[in-house]
Amino acid sequence: MPGLLAFELLLLVTTISAQGQTALLEYMQGRMAVLEDRISQWHDQSSRYTAELREFKNQVLKMLDNIEKERDSVRIELENANVRVDRLEREVDYLETQNPAPPCVDIDEKLTELHNAKKKKKEKYEKLTGCTTEEVQAIEEAAEMLSIPTVRKSYCSDTISQVNAMKILKRFGSTSGLWTKDPVGNSEKVYVFDGAGNDTVYVFSRMKEFTLSSVSRKAAKIRLPFPWLGTGHVVYEGNLYYIRNDNEFQIIKFNLANKTVVDSAVLPIEEPVPVYGLSKFNYIDIAADEEGLWAIYATKENEKNICLAKLDPSNLGIEQMWDTPCPIENAESAFVVCGALYVVYNTKLPSRSRIQCVFDVSGTISSENVPVVYFPKRYGSHSSMKYNPKEKQIYAWDDGYQIIYKLSMKPKEELY
């Protein structure tokens, strides 16, 4: 009996184990089917994503190809536009030289007042000197014929009408520099300053020698006692006025005949900054005009606009100072004509230089009633522009090229 019971128990356990195995197998088969389902779905999605990615890649390549074609087309159009602009500028330059500004016809009350003021000034001058203006003019003409220098300064009332002509002399030296002549006296010497920092001045006896010869063969050399800074020098009445930086900015007055330092001075300018936004090497620019010497500068206190000062050539003292409305930004150079400051502007990528701001110390003219005067586009930007009041010309240094600009003048009264 016990043996039979044991046999039945063994049979029951065996039966249960077989049923459990069957259930486990069925469960495993179900899980495998689910996994196969998911793998199939993943494979389908992967194939779809791959197809979409391939299509997107083709679209991007097509777009890039179109962009490249459009870029080439725009580049060609820009080149054609640049050619047309250059041609137009040349035509404008030609028209400016052929068609001078029309004369002023209408005379208003302000013009009458200016004429009356000029008449009173003439009467006052005759009273102070005891001579009429005609007599003074005759004396000056006779003195010029006899090569006798006169001490009276010329108080002119002219303003720039247009750039009448230009002449490219040659290309010499660095991209920055200065060349000029002495506007006082009858000297024909040409002075060349190569670079924004040097101590050797090249001197030619006349313009023809400078134009046709090399500097090393025909030029005399003057070694200065101190190196210059910037391109703000000027030759005036036989003396060279230039800027030296020795912990502070000094104006050196150097006699070109005796080769000696006559005088030096530190201008009462606190914290000077570069005066031109496009010519960072210039802190003080000395200019000469019909009325004497001027200093063009800028300070940290008024770092947005250019300042102007009247200099006494005899002792380098400042007679008067002005804050001008002319901005420093994009300015490349400046000069003074008949007591009026003309600031020349350009762009960081050199374009066509233009006089865009004028400050007259007498208050007769301003930027509002003076038309913008353009210079012919040539090479880069001007590192220096020196006005010669005797010749009514500007001696400019443009990217290593020495250029002369002939100016056309007209009375200030015609602006009203």
Image (cartoon, rainbow, N blue to C red):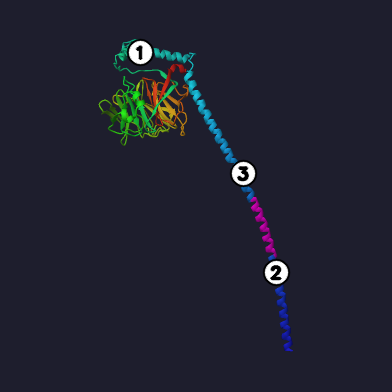
Q: Where does residue 19 sit, x and y in percent of width and height?
A: 72, 75
Instruction: Tell me the quarter of the picture where residue 255 sits.
Output: top left
Q: Please, what secondary structure does the residue beneath circle 3 have? A: helix
Amino acid, disc 3: Lys
Do we see residue 116 in this rendering?
yes
Q: Please, what secondary structure does the residue beneath circle 2 have? A: helix
The quadrant of the image that shows the N terminus is: bottom right
Q: Which mark sits nearer the N-terminus, 1 or 3? A: 3
Do we see residue 128 in this rendering?
no
Q: Which mark sits nearer the N-terminus, 2 or 1? A: 2
Q: What residue does disc 2 label?
A: 27
Callout 3: few (<14), some (14-19), or many (20+) C-alpha neighbours within 10 Å?
Answer: few
Residue 34 located within the stretch drawn in magenta: yes
Instruction: Tell me the quarter of the picture where residue 313 sits.
Output: top left
Q: What residue does disc 3 label?
A: 62
Query: Residue 124 got which mark?
Result: 1
Magenta region, residue range: 33-52
Question: CA separation, marks 2 and 1?
Answer: 124 Å
Q: Residue at x 55, y 34 (%)?
A: 76
Q: Residue at x 73, y 80 (%)?
A: 12
Amino acid, disc 2: Tyr
Amino acid, disc 1: Lys
Q: Where does residue 346 sit, x and y in percent of width and height?
A: 45, 30
Q: Nearer the viewer, mark 2 or mark 1?
A: 2
Q: Where does residue 217 sit, x and y in percent of width and height?
A: 31, 29
Callout 2: few (<14), some (14-19), or many (20+) C-alpha neighbours within 10 Å?
Answer: few
Q: Please, what secondary structure does the residue beneath circle 1 have? A: helix
Query: Residue 4 got which mark?
Result: none
Question: CA separation, marks 1 and 3?
Answer: 83 Å
Seen from the viewer's position, the closer of residues 43 and 346 is 43
Instruction: Tell me the quarter of the picture where residue 252 sits.
Output: top left
